[in-house]
Image: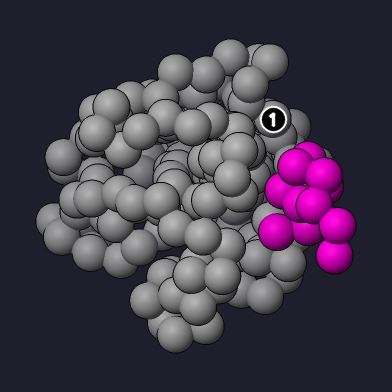
């Protein structure tokens, strides 16, 4: 069973832990979640469809990522999730934290990596990821608007797109 550290609202360790699936966090307690956005030099997004066997959001197109396990900081969790789910190696130079969003009982750190890795070079974690594909920004936004990609909320996508545009030097 996966163990998670419990954090306070500022992201500091409280010294307490909880078990995945038995997570009854009190107000002001959070666990750390990471999302990693893989974007090509052409501005395309690498998206993934979750395995149909997942308990949460089965078969949905969603962000790469997951919960940090006890003892992991945000970078370590993002680096691990990216490599486990897609087989993409990263480093502190290539993986950049772009935002933190406070959710109901999680602190969601959003990471970005710029790579042109070909889909056939990826190594998918089959119990997590059913398939992947590169999509243009327009196609991606259409999937979100059309309900074909998990809707993390307007604030989330506004933040993701703005931060990635800033990193890629895209002008509005």
Q: Percent position (x, y) of residue 153?
A: 61, 73
Q: Percent position (x, y) of residue 70?
A: 48, 25
Residue 169 among magenta residues: yes
- Read off the residue under disc 1: 96
* Residue farthest right in this picture: 171
* Residue farthest front in this picture: 42
Does 137 sit above or below residue 125?
A: below
The residue located at (35%, 63%) in the rendering is: 61
In this rendered view, identify the residue nearer to me: 133 or 110. Answer: 133
In this rendered view, identify the residue nearer to me: 166 or 84. Answer: 166
The residue located at (44%, 18%) in the rendering is: 89
Magenta stretch? 161-172
- Crowding at mark 1 (Cα within 10 Å: few <14, some 14-19, many 20+): some
**Residue 24 visible within the image:** no
Screen quadrant of the C terminus: bottom right
**Residue 149 visible within the image:** yes
In the rendered structure, the answer to whether residue 140 lies left or right of residue 106 reads: left
Q: Quadrant of residue 113?
A: top right
Does 82 sit above or below residue 107?
A: above
* Chief SS of the magenta region: helix
Does 23 sit above or below residue 104?
A: above
Residue 119 among magenta residues: no
* Residue farthest bottom in this picture: 146
Q: Percent position (x, y) of residue 57?
A: 31, 65
Q: Percent position (x, y) of residue 119?
A: 31, 38
The residue located at (42%, 30%) in the rendering is: 117
């Amino acid at each position: 069973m996966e163990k998670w550290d419990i954090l306070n609202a500022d992201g500091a360790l409280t010294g307490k832990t909880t078990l995945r699936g038995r997570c009854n966090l009190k107000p002001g307690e959070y666990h750390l979640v990471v999302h990693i956005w893989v974007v090509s030099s052409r501005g395309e997004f690498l998206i993934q469809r979750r395995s149909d066997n997942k308990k949460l959001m089965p078969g949905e197109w969603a962000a790469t990522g997951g919960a940090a396990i006890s003892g992991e900081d945000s970078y370590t969790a993002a680096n691990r999730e990216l490599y486990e789910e897609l087989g993409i190696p990263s480093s502190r130079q290539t993986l950049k934290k772009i935002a933190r969003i406070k959710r109901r009982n999680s602190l969601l750190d959003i990471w970005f990596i710029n790579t042109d890795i070909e889909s056939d070079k990826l190594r998918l974690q089959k119990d997590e990821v059913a398939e992947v594909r590169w999509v243009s920004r327009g196609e991606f936004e259409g999937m979100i608007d059309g309900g074909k990609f998990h809707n993390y909320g307007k604030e989330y996508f506004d933040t993701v797109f703005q931060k990635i545009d800033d990193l890629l030097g895209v002008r509005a």
